[in-house]
Image (tube, rainbow, N blue to C red):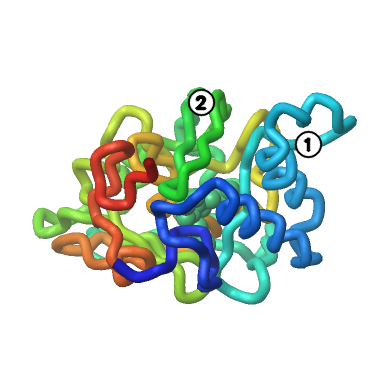
Amino acid sequence: MDELAPGSAGEPEAPRRIGRGVFLGTVVGGLSSLWWGKAVWGPVSHALSGVEAAIPLVPTKGWRIYTVAATMPVFEPHSWRLNIGGLVEQPQALSYDELRALPQVSQVSTFHCVTGWTVNGVHWRGVRFKDLLAQAKPLPGAHALQFVSAEKPYIDYLTLEQAMLPDAMLAWEMDGKPLLQEHGAPVRVVIPDMYGYKNVKWVEEINLVPKPGNGYWELLGYDRDAWVGRSNGYYS
Ligand SMILES: Nc1nc2c(c(=O)[nH]1)N[C@H]1C(S)=C(S)[C@@H](COP(=O)(O)O)O[C@H]1N2
Ligand SMILES: [Mo]
């Protein structure tokens, strides 16, 4: 395996089996990135764990904000479209309002990054893929979804079967608020049974394809089927 881990943003982050000291050192290194903004408290409180309660007004549940590009996509509500294409009968270009007019669901689930951090009790609101794809009508040859992020070149895939899991969705709300920019505004993939790297942020395009390809982290050696606790990136 290479020495990158999903979330390291191309930095020479420690390999997966690393000592606690090395791990914390990497986390503290992240403090120098100004654009992390308030999200920087995620890693700090994580690193301090027991001390977390002593820090007032820390808006964190343990998230770390990950990107692969130098800047984060900016959501413009009026011009934004979610394009659904590829092997479909009716390609779609959904506005933000049209998307949110689809049948909505909410759920509470746990989020796992393969590098070892977890966020419990995340409230999500969004649309199940079945309802999202209903108008597009996937053709018989379509067996997978390609998710293209507005953050280039981040991309990943799910099989249709995986996308139809009862707790998978395209989410536009987290913990009762519209998705924040750093968490992928306006929409991201949520698939709690798989590691974070399958949960593509800033989704702007979904293509129906015959079979899954290799996503950003899969090209670097991680499993396509990123089942939590069972895939090759499992952090121990
Ligand atoms: N576009 C994009 N989506 C992404 C990533 C990324 O770097 N870019 N990182 C993935 C990884 S490895 C994880 S663990 C989660 C982290 O979600 P967060 O940044 O909202 O904490 O986003 C996933 N989706
Ligand atoms: Mo991750």
Which of the 4 image quarters holds residue 139?
bottom left
Is 138 on the left-hand or right-hand side of 170?
A: left
Is 77 on the left-hand or right-hand side of 10?
A: right
Residue depicted at x 23% and y 59%: 89
- Report whether residue 187 is seen: no
Amino acid type, label 2: Ser
Is 136 on the left-hand or right-hand side of 38?
A: left
Q: Position of residue 181 (x, y in %)?
A: 68, 55
Check disc 2 and report its element: helix, strand or loop: strand
- Residue bearing the label numbered 1: 59
The reply to whether discs 1 and 2 touch (Cβ–Cβ < 8 Å) is no
Q: Reply above or below: 197 against 128.
A: below
Is 69 on the left-hand or right-hand side of 59?
A: left
Please rate how many residues cluster around mark 2, counting C-alpha atoms within 10 Å: few if below 14, some from 14 to 19, many from 20: some
Amino acid type, label 1: Pro
Name the foreground residue: 44 vs 61.
44
Please rate how many residues cluster around mark 1, counting C-alpha atoms within 10 Å: few if below 14, some from 14 to 19, many from 20: few
Q: Position of residue 12 (x, y in %)?
A: 51, 71
Which of the 4 image quarters holds residue 162?
top left
State which quarter of the image contains the N terminus: bottom left
Residue depicted at x 80% and y 56%: 37
Q: Reply above or below: 113 against 146.
A: above
Name the foreground residue: 186 vs 139.
186
Q: Position of residue 32 (x, y in %)?
A: 78, 66
Q: Position of residue 129 (x, y in %)?
A: 35, 41
Q: Disc 1 versus disc 2: distance between alpha carbons?
A: 22 Å
- Residue bearing the label numbered 2: 106
State which quarter of the image contains the C terminus: top left
Residue depicted at x 41% and y 39%: 169
Residue depicted at x 47% and y 29%: 110
Check disc 1 and report its element: helix, strand or loop: loop
